[in-house]
C-alpha cells in the first residue's frame, strides 16, 4: 500500500474530522474512503460492488472448471 501526504486547509481538516467522527472511522481511513468514492464516481476505479461481483463470478467459474489431478 502506498503512502501519500495531503495538505488540507483548516476548514477541510475540520470537515474531514467531523465526518470521520460521524461515521466512526479513523480520519485517515475516512480520507481514503472519500478519495476512493470520488475515483469510482469519475470512472477511474471499479466500485467495491463491481469487485465483489467479479470475485463471486470468478469463484463460480473456478468451481465449474474441471480440476486437474
Image (cartoon, grey):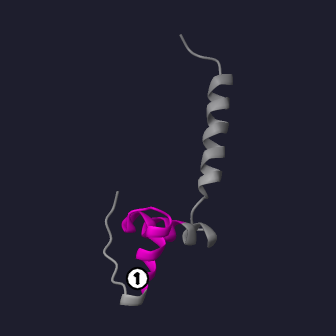
Q: Name the main secondary structure of what is drawn in magenta.
A: helix
Report which quarter residue 37 is drawn in. Answer: bottom right
Residue 19 locus on image (x, y percent): 48, 73
Q: Is residue 9 visible?
A: no
- Residue at (42% x, 85% y) in the render: 12
Residue 27 locus on image (x, y percent): 38, 68
Of residues 8 and 10, the one drawn nearer to the viewer in this rendering: 10
Report which quarter residue 16 is drawn in. Answer: bottom left
Q: Is residue 4 magenta?
A: no
- Residue at (31% x, 75% y) in the render: 5
Residue underneath mark 1: 14
Q: Is residue 15 magenta?
A: yes
Residue 4 locus on image (x, y percent): 33, 71
10 Å crowding of disc 1: few (<14), some (14-19), many (20+) = few
Q: In this rendering, is residue 9 above or below 38?
A: below
- Residue at (49% x, 65% y) in the render: 33
Q: Is residue 69 visible?
A: yes
28 lies left or right of 24: left
Q: Which residues are magenta?
A: 12-36
Across the whole image, how many numbered discs are drawn on residues?
1
Residue 18 locus on image (x, y percent): 45, 76
Amino acid at each position: 500500500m502506498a503512502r501519500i501526504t495531503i495538505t488540507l486547509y483548516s476548514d477541510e481538516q475540520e470537515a474531514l474530522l467531523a465526518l470521520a467522527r460521524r461515521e466512526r472511522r479513523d480520519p485517515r481511513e475516512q480520507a481514503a474512503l472519500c478519495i476512493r468514492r470520488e475515483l469510482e464516481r469519475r470512472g477511474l476505479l471499479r466500485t467495491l460492488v463491481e469487485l465483489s461481483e467479479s470475485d463471486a463470478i470468478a469463484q463460480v467459474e473456478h468451481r465449474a472448471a474441471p480440476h486437474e489431478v
